[in-house]
Amino acid sequence: MTGPIYPAEHRWPTTISYGGVTLVPFRRRDVRAWDAMRRRNSAWLRTWDATTPPNGHRLAARSMISQFAYEARRGEMLPWLMRFDATGGDKGELAGQLTVSAIRYGAARWASIGYWIDQRLAGRGITPAAVALATDYCFRTMQLHRVEIDIRPENTASLRVVEKLGFRHEGLRPRFLHIDGDWRDHECFALNAEEVPEGMWQRLGPGVPRLD
């Protein structure tokens, strides 16, 4: 199994595509389609949505993307949308969102990944493939050392993603992030670059994502 090819240096905006899954920069022109997908999936996503204390409000799409663009220009974030092409190409339909955030350099060289997917496309291997693409980009192109994913203990679908990719469980973080209006516990999972010298894509196995 060959796998994706990554650029030698990080430049934003950047697009990564392989096996029918594509990570594309989240731009203003995507807001209308993103809003429609969020409305369609409101019940599916609400429990896991980040909120802002103390009032627990959710950022509007245009405010959020302005903040994303600012942080991306500073090298602190990679705000991607997930697209999925059932033919295996690099175009496809909007499938969800994956964000690499809290990027730190210096002695730490680490980042955090968060993601969500349209409910009708869940369970097809798209999210693990997107996380694999993003993690390898962090390790290979950005030369980061650690990638972390924090998940609520009740989020069984998201827990299956890190299990499938072999992220190491590091323990519980009590009341770690403000989600759905309150401070919530999260399980912490992480990988260091030297743990996956062969690349994350090799961990997915053949036939992922499912294109049927």
Image (tube, rainbow, N blue to C red):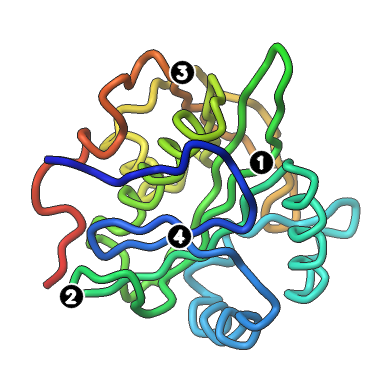
Near mark 1 (Cα within 10 A), the count class, few <14, some 14-19 or many ≥20, is some
Which residue is identified by label 4? 23
Which residue is identified by label 2? 87
Mark nearer the N terminus (1 vs 2): 2
At label 4, the amino acid type is Leu
Mark nearer the N terminus (1 vs 4): 4
| Tag in front: 2 or 3 | 2
At label 2, the amino acid type is Thr
Residue plotted at (39% across, 21% down)? 168
At label 1, the amino acid type is Arg
At label 3, the amino acid type is Asn
Q: Quadrant of the N terminus?
A: top left
| Tag in front: 1 or 3 | 3
Residue 136, how many percent across, how many down?
A: 41, 36
Does the residue at mark 4 contact the one at mark 2 (Cβ under 8 Å)? Answer: no
Residue plotted at (38% across, 71% down)? 119
From what the image shows, is residue 99 above or below residue 59? Answer: above
